[in-house]
Amino acid sequence: MFESLSDKLQDIIAKTSGQKELTQENMQDALREIRRALLEADVNLRVVKSFISNIKDKAEGEDVLRGVNPSQQLIKIVHDELIELLGKEASPLNLQGSPALIMMLGLQGSGKTTSSAKLAVKLKNEGKNPLLVACDVYRPAAITQLKTLGDQIGINVYSEESKDVQSIIKNAINFSKENGNNVLILDTAGRLQIDTEMMAELLLIDRVFHPAEKLLVIDSMTGQEAVNVAENFDAQLEITGLVLTKLDGDSRGGAALSIVYCTGKPIKLTGTGEKLNALEDFYPQRMADRILGMGDIVSLVERAQEVFDEKTAREMEKKMAKAEFSFNDFLKMQSQMKMFGSMDQLLGMIPGLKISKDDRQLISHEGEKQFKRIEVFIQSMTPEEREHPELMNSSRKKRISQGCGIPLHDINIFINQFEQMRKMMKGMSDLKNNMSKLTGKLGAGAGSKLSMHQMMKNMRRFK
Protein backbone atom coordinates (compact mmCIF):
# COMPACT_ATOMS: atom_id res chain seq x y z
CA MET A 1 0.00 0.00 0.00
CA PHE A 2 1.10 3.59 -0.67
CA GLU A 3 4.18 2.25 -2.52
CA SER A 4 4.15 4.95 -5.20
CA LEU A 5 3.64 7.83 -2.77
CA SER A 6 6.05 6.34 -0.24
CA ASP A 7 8.89 6.00 -2.77
CA LYS A 8 8.41 9.56 -4.05
CA LEU A 9 8.25 11.17 -0.61
CA GLN A 10 11.39 9.33 0.50
CA ASP A 11 13.23 10.45 -2.65
CA ILE A 12 12.14 14.07 -2.14
CA ILE A 13 13.28 14.08 1.49
CA ALA A 14 16.61 12.47 0.56
CA LYS A 15 17.34 15.36 -1.83
CA THR A 16 17.34 17.83 1.08
CA SER A 17 20.16 15.98 2.88
CA GLY A 18 22.82 18.06 1.14
CA GLN A 19 21.38 21.36 2.36
CA LYS A 20 22.70 23.15 5.44
CA GLU A 21 19.28 24.36 6.57
CA LEU A 22 15.68 24.62 5.42
CA THR A 23 15.00 28.00 3.83
CA GLN A 24 12.27 29.52 1.71
CA GLU A 25 14.45 29.05 -1.36
CA ASN A 26 15.47 25.42 -1.00
CA MET A 27 12.00 24.42 0.24
CA GLN A 28 10.28 25.52 -2.96
CA ASP A 29 11.54 22.55 -4.98
CA ALA A 30 10.74 20.07 -2.20
CA LEU A 31 7.20 21.43 -1.72
CA ARG A 32 6.58 21.41 -5.47
CA GLU A 33 7.64 17.74 -5.65
CA ILE A 34 5.55 16.80 -2.61
CA ARG A 35 2.51 18.53 -4.15
CA ARG A 36 3.04 16.62 -7.39
CA ALA A 37 3.48 13.30 -5.55
CA LEU A 38 0.22 13.82 -3.62
CA LEU A 39 -1.76 14.73 -6.72
CA GLU A 40 -0.38 11.70 -8.58
CA ALA A 41 -1.49 9.60 -5.59
CA ASP A 42 -5.04 10.86 -6.29
CA VAL A 43 -5.23 12.90 -3.08
CA ASN A 44 -8.05 15.45 -3.00
CA LEU A 45 -6.96 18.95 -4.09
CA ARG A 46 -8.30 20.56 -0.88
CA VAL A 47 -6.18 18.17 1.14
CA VAL A 48 -3.05 18.82 -0.94
CA LYS A 49 -3.35 22.60 -0.51
CA SER A 50 -3.79 22.33 3.26
CA PHE A 51 -1.00 19.76 3.61
CA ILE A 52 1.54 21.85 1.63
CA SER A 53 0.57 25.04 3.45
CA ASN A 54 1.07 23.45 6.86
CA ILE A 55 4.45 21.96 5.91
CA LYS A 56 5.61 25.32 4.54
CA ASP A 57 4.57 27.18 7.70
CA LYS A 58 6.34 24.72 9.99
CA ALA A 59 9.46 24.37 7.86
CA GLU A 60 9.99 28.12 7.68
CA GLY A 61 8.80 28.86 11.21
CA GLU A 62 10.51 28.99 14.58
CA ASP A 63 9.74 25.32 15.32
CA VAL A 64 12.63 24.14 13.12
CA LEU A 65 15.52 22.99 15.31
CA ARG A 66 18.85 24.63 14.54
CA GLY A 67 21.79 22.32 13.96
CA VAL A 68 19.58 19.39 12.94
CA ASN A 69 19.99 17.79 9.52
CA PRO A 70 17.49 19.41 7.08
CA SER A 71 16.28 16.05 5.76
CA GLN A 72 15.55 14.93 9.33
CA GLN A 73 13.68 18.17 9.96
CA LEU A 74 11.60 17.64 6.83
CA ILE A 75 10.88 14.01 7.75
CA LYS A 76 9.63 15.14 11.18
CA ILE A 77 7.42 17.85 9.69
CA VAL A 78 5.96 15.61 6.95
CA HIS A 79 5.52 12.77 9.46
CA ASP A 80 3.57 14.98 11.88
CA GLU A 81 1.37 16.32 9.08
CA LEU A 82 0.63 12.82 7.78
CA ILE A 83 -0.48 11.75 11.26
CA GLU A 84 -2.71 14.84 11.46
CA LEU A 85 -4.12 14.11 8.02
CA LEU A 86 -4.86 10.47 8.87
CA GLY A 87 -6.77 11.34 12.03
CA LYS A 88 -4.17 12.02 14.78
CA GLU A 89 -4.85 8.87 16.81
CA ALA A 90 -6.61 5.51 16.64
CA SER A 91 -10.38 5.47 17.11
CA PRO A 92 -11.54 2.16 18.62
CA LEU A 93 -14.96 0.67 17.94
CA ASN A 94 -17.81 1.72 20.21
CA LEU A 95 -19.35 -1.50 21.52
CA GLN A 96 -21.81 0.01 23.99
CA GLY A 97 -25.24 -1.56 24.20
CA SER A 98 -26.68 -4.91 25.08
CA PRO A 99 -26.25 -6.08 22.44
CA ALA A 100 -24.07 -3.52 20.64
CA LEU A 101 -25.29 -2.81 17.12
CA ILE A 102 -22.89 -2.15 14.26
CA MET A 103 -24.53 -1.06 11.01
CA MET A 104 -22.41 -1.72 7.92
CA LEU A 105 -23.05 0.73 5.09
CA GLY A 106 -21.71 1.10 1.57
CA LEU A 107 -22.22 1.21 -2.15
CA GLN A 108 -22.95 -1.91 -4.12
CA GLY A 109 -19.73 -3.85 -4.68
CA SER A 110 -17.70 -2.03 -2.02
CA GLY A 111 -16.95 -5.27 -0.12
CA LYS A 112 -19.46 -4.64 2.66
CA THR A 113 -20.62 -8.25 3.16
CA THR A 114 -17.07 -9.61 3.21
CA SER A 115 -16.03 -6.82 5.59
CA SER A 116 -18.93 -7.76 7.87
CA ALA A 117 -17.60 -11.33 8.06
CA LYS A 118 -14.05 -10.09 8.63
CA LEU A 119 -15.26 -7.85 11.45
CA ALA A 120 -17.05 -10.82 13.01
CA VAL A 121 -13.78 -12.80 12.95
CA LYS A 122 -11.91 -9.90 14.54
CA LEU A 123 -14.48 -9.48 17.33
CA LYS A 124 -14.56 -13.22 17.97
CA ASN A 125 -10.77 -13.26 18.35
CA GLU A 126 -11.11 -10.41 20.86
CA GLY A 127 -13.46 -12.45 23.05
CA LYS A 128 -16.80 -11.16 21.78
CA ASN A 129 -19.71 -13.30 20.65
CA PRO A 130 -20.88 -11.64 17.41
CA LEU A 131 -23.97 -12.42 15.36
CA LEU A 132 -24.20 -11.56 11.66
CA VAL A 133 -27.61 -10.27 10.60
CA ALA A 134 -28.62 -10.51 6.94
CA CYS A 135 -30.37 -7.20 6.23
CA ASP A 136 -29.79 -7.17 2.48
CA VAL A 137 -33.17 -8.44 1.28
CA TYR A 138 -32.82 -7.04 -2.24
CA ARG A 139 -29.64 -8.40 -3.81
CA PRO A 140 -30.00 -11.92 -5.18
CA ALA A 141 -27.92 -14.46 -3.21
CA ALA A 142 -26.84 -11.82 -0.63
CA ILE A 143 -28.15 -13.91 2.27
CA THR A 144 -26.57 -17.06 0.80
CA GLN A 145 -23.21 -15.28 0.55
CA LEU A 146 -23.37 -14.17 4.18
CA LYS A 147 -24.35 -17.67 5.34
CA THR A 148 -21.47 -19.20 3.38
CA LEU A 149 -19.04 -16.77 5.00
CA GLY A 150 -20.58 -17.47 8.41
CA ASP A 151 -20.02 -21.22 7.94
CA GLN A 152 -16.37 -20.61 7.01
CA ILE A 153 -15.66 -18.59 10.16
CA GLY A 154 -17.92 -20.52 12.55
CA ILE A 155 -20.25 -17.60 13.35
CA ASN A 156 -24.05 -17.69 13.33
CA VAL A 157 -26.00 -15.75 10.72
CA TYR A 158 -29.54 -14.59 11.50
CA SER A 159 -31.81 -14.33 8.45
CA GLU A 160 -35.49 -14.42 7.52
CA GLU A 161 -37.52 -14.74 4.34
CA SER A 162 -39.25 -11.46 5.23
CA LYS A 163 -38.58 -8.23 3.31
CA ASP A 164 -39.25 -6.13 6.42
CA VAL A 165 -35.73 -5.13 7.52
CA GLN A 166 -36.86 -3.51 10.78
CA SER A 167 -38.70 -6.67 11.79
CA ILE A 168 -35.60 -8.77 10.97
CA ILE A 169 -33.38 -6.58 13.18
CA LYS A 170 -35.91 -6.61 16.05
CA ASN A 171 -36.13 -10.41 15.93
CA ALA A 172 -32.34 -10.69 15.65
CA ILE A 173 -31.95 -8.64 18.85
CA ASN A 174 -34.33 -11.02 20.67
CA PHE A 175 -32.43 -14.00 19.23
CA SER A 176 -29.11 -12.55 20.41
CA LYS A 177 -30.37 -12.09 23.96
CA GLU A 178 -31.51 -15.71 24.09
CA ASN A 179 -28.21 -17.02 22.66
CA GLY A 180 -25.67 -14.78 24.40
CA ASN A 181 -24.58 -12.73 21.38
CA ASN A 182 -23.24 -9.37 22.58
CA VAL A 183 -22.51 -7.72 19.19
CA LEU A 184 -24.82 -7.63 16.18
CA ILE A 185 -23.31 -6.81 12.79
CA LEU A 186 -26.04 -5.58 10.43
CA ASP A 187 -25.11 -6.29 6.81
CA THR A 188 -27.38 -3.78 5.10
CA ALA A 189 -28.11 -3.65 1.38
CA GLY A 190 -25.67 -1.84 -0.90
CA ARG A 191 -26.89 1.54 -2.13
CA LEU A 192 -26.48 3.83 -5.09
CA GLN A 193 -25.74 7.44 -4.22
CA ILE A 194 -28.93 8.55 -5.93
CA ASP A 195 -31.09 5.80 -4.39
CA THR A 196 -33.14 7.96 -2.00
CA GLU A 197 -35.62 5.19 -1.19
CA MET A 198 -32.93 2.82 0.09
CA MET A 199 -31.16 5.64 1.93
CA ALA A 200 -34.47 6.34 3.67
CA GLU A 201 -34.49 2.72 4.88
CA LEU A 202 -31.11 3.26 6.54
CA LEU A 203 -32.38 6.44 8.20
CA LEU A 204 -35.32 4.52 9.69
CA ILE A 205 -33.00 1.77 11.01
CA ASP A 206 -30.81 4.46 12.58
CA ARG A 207 -33.72 6.27 14.25
CA VAL A 208 -35.44 3.12 15.52
CA PHE A 209 -32.45 1.09 16.76
CA HIS A 210 -29.73 3.73 17.41
CA PRO A 211 -26.70 1.60 16.42
CA ALA A 212 -23.48 2.25 18.36
CA GLU A 213 -21.52 2.30 15.12
CA LYS A 214 -22.45 3.27 11.57
CA LEU A 215 -19.44 2.13 9.56
CA LEU A 216 -19.15 3.12 5.92
CA VAL A 217 -17.23 0.56 3.84
CA ILE A 218 -15.19 2.25 1.12
CA ASP A 219 -13.16 0.69 -1.69
CA SER A 220 -9.84 2.53 -1.30
CA MET A 221 -8.99 2.00 -4.96
CA THR A 222 -11.75 4.42 -6.02
CA GLY A 223 -9.47 7.33 -5.06
CA GLN A 224 -11.11 10.76 -4.93
CA GLU A 225 -14.54 9.26 -5.64
CA ALA A 226 -14.31 7.72 -2.15
CA VAL A 227 -14.49 11.25 -0.71
CA ASN A 228 -17.71 12.01 -2.61
CA VAL A 229 -19.30 8.75 -1.43
CA ALA A 230 -18.29 9.35 2.20
CA GLU A 231 -19.52 12.95 2.21
CA ASN A 232 -22.85 11.85 0.70
CA PHE A 233 -23.45 9.12 3.29
CA ASP A 234 -22.27 11.32 6.16
CA ALA A 235 -24.57 14.17 5.18
CA GLN A 236 -27.59 11.88 5.38
CA LEU A 237 -26.66 9.41 8.14
CA GLU A 238 -23.86 11.00 10.20
CA ILE A 239 -21.59 7.97 9.96
CA THR A 240 -19.36 7.20 12.96
CA GLY A 241 -16.37 5.79 11.10
CA LEU A 242 -14.89 4.30 7.95
CA VAL A 243 -13.68 0.89 6.84
CA LEU A 244 -11.21 1.02 3.92
CA THR A 245 -11.09 -2.17 1.88
CA LYS A 246 -8.42 -3.29 -0.62
CA LEU A 247 -5.80 -1.11 1.04
CA ASP A 248 -3.18 -3.73 0.14
CA GLY A 249 -3.95 -3.19 -3.55
CA ASP A 250 -3.91 0.62 -3.40
CA SER A 251 -0.41 1.74 -4.33
CA ARG A 252 -1.41 5.41 -4.43
CA GLY A 253 -3.25 5.98 -1.14
CA GLY A 254 -5.41 8.91 -2.24
CA ALA A 255 -8.55 7.72 -0.46
CA ALA A 256 -6.90 7.16 2.93
CA LEU A 257 -5.13 10.53 2.81
CA SER A 258 -8.23 12.47 1.76
CA ILE A 259 -11.22 10.94 3.44
CA VAL A 260 -10.56 11.85 7.08
CA TYR A 261 -9.79 15.48 6.26
CA CYS A 262 -12.87 15.88 4.05
CA THR A 263 -15.41 14.11 6.29
CA GLY A 264 -13.99 14.68 9.76
CA LYS A 265 -14.72 11.01 10.49
CA PRO A 266 -12.02 8.50 11.53
CA ILE A 267 -10.81 5.46 9.64
CA LYS A 268 -11.49 2.70 12.17
CA LEU A 269 -10.59 -0.45 10.24
CA THR A 270 -8.67 -1.40 7.11
CA GLY A 271 -8.88 -4.50 4.93
CA THR A 272 -5.38 -5.60 3.95
CA GLY A 273 -5.99 -8.85 2.10
CA GLU A 274 -8.52 -11.35 0.82
CA LYS A 275 -8.36 -13.69 3.83
CA LEU A 276 -11.14 -13.42 6.39
CA ASN A 277 -8.69 -12.49 9.16
CA ALA A 278 -7.27 -9.58 7.13
CA LEU A 279 -9.04 -6.72 8.91
CA GLU A 280 -6.97 -4.47 11.17
CA ASP A 281 -7.44 -1.52 13.48
CA PHE A 282 -6.21 1.69 11.87
CA TYR A 283 -3.39 3.62 13.56
CA PRO A 284 -2.50 6.97 11.94
CA GLN A 285 1.04 7.06 13.35
CA ARG A 286 1.87 3.55 12.19
CA MET A 287 0.56 4.33 8.71
CA ALA A 288 2.62 7.53 8.57
CA ASP A 289 5.69 5.51 9.60
CA ARG A 290 5.13 3.08 6.76
CA ILE A 291 4.54 5.80 4.17
CA LEU A 292 7.89 7.37 5.08
CA GLY A 293 9.73 4.04 5.05
CA MET A 294 10.12 3.80 8.83
CA GLY A 295 8.48 0.39 9.01
CA ASP A 296 5.79 -0.74 11.44
CA ILE A 297 7.39 -2.99 14.03
CA VAL A 298 4.42 -2.72 16.44
CA SER A 299 1.96 -4.13 13.90
CA LEU A 300 4.49 -6.81 12.99
CA VAL A 301 4.75 -7.96 16.63
CA GLU A 302 0.98 -7.84 17.10
CA ARG A 303 0.45 -9.95 14.00
CA ALA A 304 3.03 -12.46 15.25
CA GLN A 305 1.16 -12.76 18.54
CA GLU A 306 -2.07 -13.44 16.66
CA VAL A 307 -0.55 -15.98 14.29
CA PHE A 308 1.77 -18.04 16.47
CA ASP A 309 0.13 -20.30 19.00
CA GLU A 310 2.11 -20.37 22.26
CA LYS A 311 1.47 -24.07 22.92
CA THR A 312 2.57 -25.02 19.40
CA ALA A 313 5.67 -22.85 19.76
CA ARG A 314 6.66 -24.65 22.98
CA GLU A 315 6.18 -28.05 21.33
CA MET A 316 8.33 -26.93 18.40
CA GLU A 317 11.03 -25.74 20.81
CA LYS A 318 11.14 -29.14 22.52
CA LYS A 319 11.50 -30.90 19.18
CA MET A 320 14.28 -28.54 18.14
CA ALA A 321 16.14 -29.23 21.39
CA LYS A 322 16.13 -32.96 20.64
CA ALA A 323 16.83 -32.55 16.91
CA GLU A 324 13.39 -34.09 16.24
CA PHE A 325 12.19 -31.25 14.03
CA SER A 326 10.44 -32.97 11.09
CA PHE A 327 9.27 -32.05 7.61
CA ASN A 328 5.71 -31.92 9.03
CA ASP A 329 6.89 -29.34 11.57
CA PHE A 330 8.45 -27.34 8.76
CA LEU A 331 5.11 -27.32 6.91
CA LYS A 332 3.33 -26.15 10.08
CA MET A 333 5.81 -23.33 10.50
CA GLN A 334 5.43 -22.36 6.84
CA SER A 335 1.63 -22.41 7.17
CA GLN A 336 1.79 -20.03 10.12
CA MET A 337 4.11 -17.73 8.19
CA LYS A 338 1.50 -17.54 5.40
CA MET A 339 -1.03 -16.25 7.94
CA PHE A 340 1.22 -13.23 8.45
CA GLY A 341 0.25 -12.00 5.00
CA SER A 342 2.32 -11.62 1.87
CA MET A 343 6.09 -11.38 2.14
CA ASP A 344 5.80 -8.00 0.42
CA GLN A 345 3.68 -6.69 3.34
CA LEU A 346 6.11 -8.08 5.91
CA LEU A 347 9.12 -6.45 4.24
CA GLY A 348 7.26 -3.14 4.30
CA MET A 349 6.86 -3.39 8.09
CA ILE A 350 10.56 -3.85 8.86
CA PRO A 351 12.10 -0.55 10.00
CA GLY A 352 15.19 0.67 8.18
CA LEU A 353 14.87 -1.83 5.33
CA LYS A 354 15.69 0.26 2.28
CA ILE A 355 14.28 -1.84 -0.56
CA SER A 356 12.55 -0.37 -3.59
CA LYS A 357 9.01 -1.36 -4.46
CA ASP A 358 10.17 -3.41 -7.48
CA ASP A 359 12.89 -5.24 -5.50
CA ARG A 360 10.47 -5.95 -2.66
CA GLN A 361 7.95 -7.43 -5.05
CA LEU A 362 10.67 -9.51 -6.73
CA ILE A 363 11.89 -10.88 -3.39
CA SER A 364 8.30 -11.58 -2.35
CA HIS A 365 7.48 -13.35 -5.63
CA GLU A 366 10.62 -15.51 -5.63
CA GLY A 367 10.29 -16.34 -1.92
CA GLU A 368 6.66 -17.40 -2.18
CA LYS A 369 7.42 -19.43 -5.33
CA GLN A 370 10.17 -21.26 -3.44
CA PHE A 371 7.84 -21.95 -0.50
CA LYS A 372 5.31 -23.54 -2.89
CA ARG A 373 8.00 -25.80 -4.41
CA ILE A 374 9.09 -26.97 -0.95
CA GLU A 375 5.47 -27.66 -0.01
CA VAL A 376 4.95 -29.79 -3.15
CA PHE A 377 8.20 -31.66 -2.43
CA ILE A 378 7.29 -32.49 1.19
CA GLN A 379 3.73 -33.50 0.29
CA SER A 380 5.18 -35.99 -2.22
CA MET A 381 6.75 -37.94 0.68
CA THR A 382 5.12 -40.77 2.58
CA PRO A 383 3.74 -39.91 6.06
CA GLU A 384 6.64 -41.84 7.62
CA GLU A 385 9.25 -39.88 5.61
CA ARG A 386 7.67 -36.56 6.56
CA GLU A 387 7.89 -37.43 10.25
CA HIS A 388 11.38 -39.01 10.13
CA PRO A 389 13.81 -37.03 7.91
CA GLU A 390 16.63 -39.45 8.75
CA LEU A 391 14.94 -42.07 6.51
CA MET A 392 15.77 -40.10 3.38
CA ASN A 393 18.20 -42.02 1.16
CA SER A 394 19.09 -41.94 -2.53
CA SER A 395 16.27 -44.20 -3.72
CA ARG A 396 13.64 -42.31 -1.72
CA LYS A 397 14.89 -38.96 -3.02
CA LYS A 398 14.82 -40.26 -6.60
CA ARG A 399 11.25 -41.53 -6.18
CA ILE A 400 10.09 -38.20 -4.69
CA SER A 401 11.84 -36.25 -7.47
CA GLN A 402 9.99 -38.24 -10.13
CA GLY A 403 6.70 -37.85 -8.25
CA CYS A 404 6.78 -34.07 -7.77
CA GLY A 405 8.72 -33.06 -10.88
CA ILE A 406 11.46 -31.24 -8.97
CA PRO A 407 15.04 -32.00 -10.05
CA LEU A 408 16.99 -34.34 -7.76
CA HIS A 409 19.74 -31.72 -7.46
CA ASP A 410 17.28 -29.20 -5.96
CA ILE A 411 15.89 -31.80 -3.56
CA ASN A 412 19.40 -32.62 -2.32
CA ILE A 413 20.10 -28.93 -1.74
CA PHE A 414 16.91 -28.48 0.31
CA ILE A 415 17.51 -31.62 2.43
CA ASN A 416 21.08 -30.53 3.16
CA GLN A 417 19.86 -27.09 4.18
CA PHE A 418 17.13 -28.67 6.30
CA GLU A 419 19.67 -30.83 8.15
CA GLN A 420 21.92 -27.82 8.74
CA MET A 421 18.92 -25.94 10.12
CA ARG A 422 18.11 -28.83 12.52
CA LYS A 423 21.70 -28.85 13.80
CA MET A 424 21.71 -25.09 14.21
CA MET A 425 18.40 -25.22 16.13
CA LYS A 426 19.74 -27.88 18.46
CA GLY A 427 22.95 -25.93 18.98
CA MET A 428 21.03 -22.79 19.88
CA SER A 429 18.84 -24.78 22.26
CA ASP A 430 21.91 -26.31 23.97
CA LEU A 431 23.44 -22.86 24.33
CA LYS A 432 20.23 -21.53 25.85
CA ASN A 433 20.10 -24.41 28.37
CA ASN A 434 23.75 -23.98 29.29
CA MET A 435 23.32 -20.27 29.81
CA SER A 436 20.28 -20.96 32.03
CA LYS A 437 22.35 -23.35 34.16
CA LEU A 438 25.17 -20.84 34.34
CA THR A 439 22.78 -18.11 35.37
CA GLY A 440 21.43 -20.40 38.08
CA LYS A 441 24.94 -21.12 39.36
CA LEU A 442 25.85 -17.45 39.40
CA GLY A 443 22.51 -16.57 40.97
CA ALA A 444 23.10 -19.06 43.76
CA GLY A 445 26.14 -17.02 44.74
CA ALA A 446 24.15 -13.81 45.08
CA GLY A 447 24.84 -12.36 48.49
CA SER A 448 28.50 -13.40 48.38
CA LYS A 449 30.76 -11.94 45.73
CA LEU A 450 32.11 -14.45 43.22
CA SER A 451 35.74 -14.06 42.26
CA MET A 452 36.73 -13.82 38.59
CA HIS A 453 38.45 -17.20 38.98
CA GLN A 454 35.20 -18.83 40.19
CA MET A 455 33.18 -17.30 37.37
CA MET A 456 35.65 -18.50 34.71
CA LYS A 457 35.65 -21.95 36.29
CA ASN A 458 31.83 -22.11 36.08
CA MET A 459 31.86 -20.95 32.47
CA ARG A 460 34.48 -23.56 31.41
CA ARG A 461 32.25 -26.26 32.89
CA PHE A 462 29.54 -25.48 30.32
CA LYS A 463 31.71 -25.32 27.21
Image (tube, helix red, strand yellow):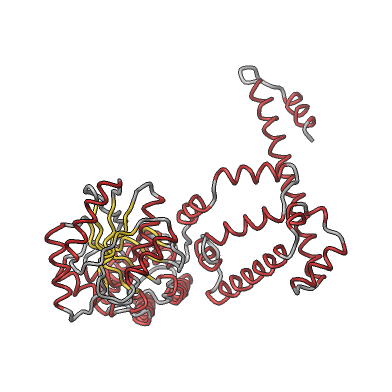
The quadrant of the image that shows the N terminus is bottom left
Q: Residue furthest top?
A: 448
From this view, report whether residue 438 is shown above or below residue 414. Answer: above
From this view, report whether residue 35 is shown above or below residue 153. Answer: below
Q: Residue furthest right?
A: 394
User: Which residue is at 36% across, 53% downward?
Assistant: 123
Percent x, y of residue 148: 40, 65
The quadrant of the image that shows the C terminus is top right
Q: Quadrant of residue 427?
A: top right
Q: In the displayed structure, does residue 144 sit left or right of residue 135?
A: right
User: Which residue is at 75% across, 27% downward?
Assistant: 458
Q: Quadrant of residue 4?
A: bottom left
Judging depth in this view, the residue of 58 and 38 nearest the camera is: 38
Percent x, y of residue 134: 28, 64
Percent x, y of residue 281: 37, 58
Judging depth in this view, the residue of 126 and 225 nearest the camera is: 126
Q: In the displayed structure, does residue 37 sit left or right of residue 360?
A: left
Q: Quadrant of residue 253?
A: bottom left
Judging depth in this view, the residue of 294 and 349 nearest the camera is: 349
User: Which residue is at 56% across, 72% downward?
Assistant: 360
Percent x, y of residue 166: 17, 63
Q: In the displayed structure, does residue 264 sit left or right of residue 362?
A: left
From this view, report whether residue 180 is shown above or below residue 110. Answer: above
All told, the count of numbered labels is 0
